[in-house]
Image: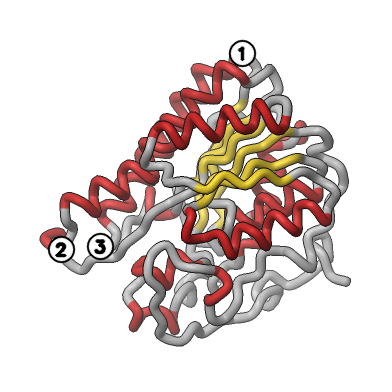
Amino acid sequence: MTDQYTFKNPVTAYEHIEPPKQHQPEPGLDAKLEPKADLGEDTYRGTGRLDGRKAIVTGADSGIGAATAIAFAREGADVVLSYLPEEEEDAAKIANLIEKAGRKAVKVPGDLKDAAICQKLVDTALQELGGLDLLVNNAGKQVAQEDIGDITDEQFDHTQKTNVYAMFWLTRAAVPHLPAGSTIINTTSIQAYNPSPTLLDYATTKASINNFTKGLAQQLAPKGIRVNAVAPGPIWTPLQVSSGQPKEALPEFGKDTPLGRAGQPAELAPAYVFLASAESSFVVGETLNVNGGSPTP
């Protein structure tokens, strides 16, 4: 069976999807996505690179977070899964896959816009996993608007709190418990460098995540804690169909990349595993772009 190590042409390694026009209410479900996203369920092969690690992954029910949680488990990590209560169907599937890999999955539904939920995630990891040494701040909110006048105060506030405040709250709660050798990985975006005119508030948060990552990396490096980020390009996830993209743009989603296609969550997971593992021991404050070839600074 093919896996992430199989020699392949990246242009044709995954389907060139043409998603039909569709809409799901936020936050969107992977179970209802058409076509289905590839989370690496059938292809990711672990090699023990994260044996014994204890992780929190936010937005772990679908998309990039789900693919990362699956990969972490198959590499030997136990995982606390953070997701919204409405995403229980997707989260249950990912928890089951983690347990099939022989690792512990702990589900913690809750809205990260609440600082108390962020603290609960850390407390749960300490209690249920016996510690914490890997934090992936991945949960995100993205709603496309054609005009700045259409971005309500509520939308702007929710986007900031989900993408930036939650990252800050979770990291602040986690750092006192992270031993030397721990890693923090934040999900930024190509939008931090090349913002779409319809994603003003989202792109603003992603630029903030870049700066937070580089500043925190310098602060924590002397303690032996590495902080890095992954910057995805157009990746096929439920975020795109729950107002993340204009519906009429979905059939062309990702076709403007040099590879000519959208990426799949399965293609992101190895980047997170690399940054989480000891293989990247001298990589600190880096933003790893996984975007199909679009130029970035």
Nearer the observer, disc 2 or disc 1? Answer: 2
Between 56 and 219, the one nearer to me in the picture: 56
The residue closer to the viewer here, 68 or 90, is 90
* Residue matched to label 2: 150
> Count of labels shown?
3
In this rendering, is residue 100 above or below 216?
below
Mark 3: secondary structure: loop
Q: Residue at coordinates 61% horizontally, 32% vertically from top-left?
A: 124
Give the mark nearest the N terminus, 2 or 3.
Answer: 2
Q: Is residue 151 visible?
A: yes
- Cβ atoms under marks 2 and 3 closer than 8 Å: no
Tell me residue 197's x, y (percent).
25, 62
Quarter of image, res 77: top right
Query: Residue 246 vs residue 261: left or right?
Result: left
How far apart are labels 2 and 1 at the CA level? Answer: 44 Å
Say which residue label 1 marks: 223
Q: Residue at x 57, y 38 (%)?
A: 185
